[in-house]
Image (cartoon, rainbow, N blue to C red):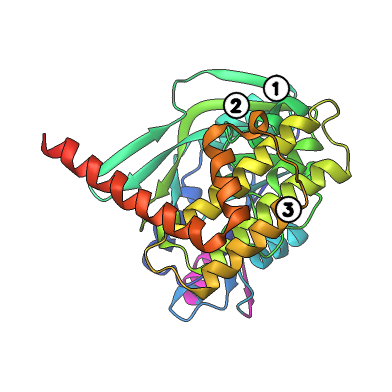
Amino acid sequence: MKQPTISIIIPVYNGEKYLPQCIDSILAQSYPHWELLLIDDGSKDSSGSICEAYAQKDSRIKAIHQQNSGQAAARNAGVAMATGDYISFIDCDDWIDSDMYQTMVSTLQQQQAEVIICGYIEEYDGRQKHVHTDETITVYDAMEAVKLVLQNRIGSYLWSMLFRRDVVQEKMPDLNPYEDHATIFKWISHARRVVLLNHAFYHYRQLGSSSLHSYNPKRGNHYFGAIKERYHYITDHQLLPGWESENRRLYLRSCIKLAKDLARIPDYDTELKAIILEVRDELKTFLPIRLDEVGLKYYLRLRLLMLSPDAFVSVLRFTSSFSLKRRKESKTL
């Protein structure tokens, strides 16, 4: 019986420090039926040469070089070139365990599913954090899985997933680093069955803070674009009949939370204010919004945002400072 092949797609940009470890972890896989597409996205360091060197050593590895176009464009280029039965994505500064693909392909076949999602380990300097690693296996139908993604109970991380080729249909939008946030739920909706395999195969290297406080305005705007894409795609395609109210509630809360997080960024400026005003304009299209739709905390923030964006920012920044002071005092005690 012919074994299915996997197309592994790695966008590469200035990854010379960690790229060899990443590629070596693929070469060490117990499952040999794969092709590796290294998409060099205009790297300015030696990453392109590293890609070429590995491609010379193993015929399953292909090095593709393009002008810098962003992570989504690199991933889309990889999908367009892929020939495998399954599609996988890895970030060039991460690595995987040697039995990852063997186990995931076997589990997919056993469960007759099209998508599988594994646990992972966040790798910090000197410590680890295991996420979704209780060794359970749960199978969902596609619409159940989509709901869990929208509720953020299944994370929108491409690198933790293996997709059967035919569900990977829509292109990823240029919303770095949130193109997967705006796309994964669509791909899952094309499946019949989705497997959640709570075993950590993927090592997610933490190179810096991922909190909104480290965002530049472009990233904040991209997140806004991603949550808008989620809501409007679900609505326009009538993807979840009977779940319209919950989809609306999740979206409204996400918009209000985004405005709150942007207001609390230390280097608040006119660019961040412009995004908050865009969020406010979007929320206006949903008025009236009821208290029971979003909850008291979100409702009060919404009312203040509608009344005065400047007052909204001032109050949120003040309460953030007060909360931080209380946390420091509690640690001292």
In what element is the residue under mark 1? strand
Give the CA separation, mark 2 to mark 1: 8 Å
The tag on residue 284 is 3
- Tell me where residue 32 sits by quadrant: top right
Magenta residues span 49-67
Looking at the rendered image, the quarter that the N terminus falls into is top right
As drawn, is 286 to the left or to the right of 89? right
Looking at the rendered image, the quarter that the C terminus falls into is top left
> Would you place residue 107 above or below residue 280 in this image?
above
Q: What is the residue that sits farthest to the front in this orientation?
A: 307
> Would you place residue 74 above or below residue 43 in this image?
above
For the point 26% across and 51% down, the residue is: 125
The tag on residue 196 is 2
Give the CA separation, mark 3 to mark 2: 37 Å
3 vs 2, front mark: 3
Q: Looking at the image, is mark 2 or mark 1 earlier in the sequence?
A: 1
For the point 68% across and 35% down, the residue is: 249
> Would you place residue 224 above or below residue 99 in this image?
below
Residue 170, position as x, y percentages in the image: 80, 53
Give the CA separation, mark 3 to mark 1: 36 Å
Q: Tell me if I can see residue 191 in this picture.
A: yes
Q: Tell me if I can see residue 164 in this picture.
A: no
For the point 64% across and 51% down, the residue is: 180
Q: What is the residue that sits farthest to the left in this orientation?
A: 333
In what element is the residue under mark 3? helix
Residue occupied by mark 1: 140
For the point 80% across and 41% down, the residue is: 234
In what element is the residue under mark 2? strand
Residue 310, position as x, y percentages in the image: 51, 63
